[in-house]
Amino acid sequence: MTTLAGKVALVTGSTRGIGRAIALRLAQDGADIAVHGRSDTGPSQAAAIESCEAIRALGRRADAFTADIASKEEVGTLIEQVESAFGRLDVLVLNAARAPFKETRRLLERDLRQLVEVNLFGHVFCVQKALPLLEREGGRIVFISSLGSRYMNPQYPLGPMKAAMEAMVRQWAEELAGAGVGANAVCAGLVKTDSYKTLRRLWPELGALPESAYVTPEEVADVVAFLAAPDSRAICGQTLVVDRGLSNRVMRAPAE
Amino acid sequence: MANPHVTRERVEEEVRAALATTLRTDADAIELDTSIVNGLGATSIDFLDINFRLENVFGVQLATQVLLDHVEEELGEGKAIDRDGKVTAPAAEILKLYLGDLPGLEAGMYADEVSTVVTPRVVADGVVRVLDTLPDACTHCGASEWKSEDGAQVVCGACGKEAVYPTGDDLTKRWIHDVEGEKQLFANA
């Protein structure tokens, strides 16, 4: 597919997991990719290099950038670097997230600040700083949320941040429509990424779910690709749930 | 208390096996006192896999939080980790009591880097600490007839249910209060 040919996408948190799958899918659709991670040391750097190599193997351009999105200054530098490397930005995917897995009553002040600064402030900084570039191209923004936005998950304080994200996407969509920039979100169900490795230890019931209850990173990425492409131009401020029906069948067990 | 059904050797063997599977390396080549991060190349995500495997083998729940986070939650934020994210002097002391006097473990190191001193022996200690709390009687039926067919999972000889151990997090919290009660590391800091 070439729906994104000639375009440039920045995917935050794209060195692994869902972010990496999104970066690869957008590259398949023709976009050059700015890969982003928080840290540039050791395993993170190796993961960033791997992501870039996988994108280049698809015949697209890829460069890796580092920024703590909780820092407005670092986000400013990130967007400047993306502009000087690629000259434009058409698609911004806000996938990066960082949160402890613990009960809300046990959150330390620094846990709570990090939670809000990365998962709320961070996305606002990214949109604010990227906006001049996105406006130039009539760009698209896609937020990556999770079912924690609307259902309680044990020891998952990221959930309320995802609820804020889904509320904020409505705000952005309305504010940016006049500038020709679209904003929507994808709410992912259970995905077996690195976070799942923590969740399965805290939430033994997960072991009872059949494989069919899990969404793959690629299935999430496919919907992101749709929201990043012109075919979704009339969708505005919405959150699409991609969970293989998990939340649709609350009253019965999923089929084996 | 001790657990007569699971040997220390078995725990160490399973720690080596979990490391070998997760890190795709040879179990026999893993030294018990090597750094899992610096020596074996593990990441923080790998520890989740390693612990998950051990939890399944032994039927236990290992600690999900590191010691210093527990100290901060139990005794007050800022007591173990300073504003720059570095380990305080009393926190270094309690870490040495908990993990042993490992090379590189010292006050002023970044709290994020404490995991780099963790060795296979430390992981085994954590498993043994939970296993050693095997209660005298089965919490389901009250019988005192523990047995283990595989030398890892302990079950009740009367009702057949698996032994229920306290979680690693609960044990860690209890231990912190015991140590603080005795040594007043943080109260006097």
Image (tube, grey):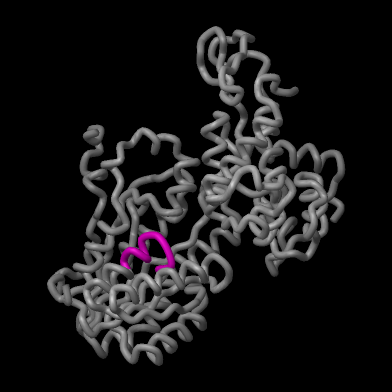
- Residue A132 location, quadrant: bottom left
Q: Name the chief secondary structure element in magenta.
A: helix
Tell me if residue A24 comes above or below residue B45 in the rendering.
below
Question: In x, y percent, where is residue B81?
Answer: 71, 60
Tell me if residue B89 can be seen.
yes
Residue at 31 percent across and 84 percent down: it is A89
Taking A49 as reference, is A238 left or right? left
Residue at 27 percent across and 87 percent down: it is A135
Residue at 46 percent across and 79 percent down: it is A65
Question: In x, y percent, where is residue A120?
Answer: 43, 67
> Where the N terminus of chain B falls, by quadrant?
top right
Q: Is residue A15 magenta?
A: yes
Taking A169 as reference, is A121 left or right? right
Q: Which residues are magenta?
A: A14-22
Tell me if residue B124 comes above or below residue A41 in the rendering.
above
Tell me if residue B35 comes above or below residue A130 in the rendering.
above
Q: Nearer the viewer, residue B64 or A73?
A: B64
Question: In x, y percent, where is residue A85?
Answer: 39, 89
Question: In x, y percent, where is residue A97?
Answer: 44, 63
Taking A119 as reference, is A145 left or right? left
Residue at 70 percent across and 31 percent down: it is B9
> Where the C terminus of chain B falls, by quadrant?
bottom right
Q: Is residue B36 magenta?
A: no
Tell me if residue A251 can be seen.
no
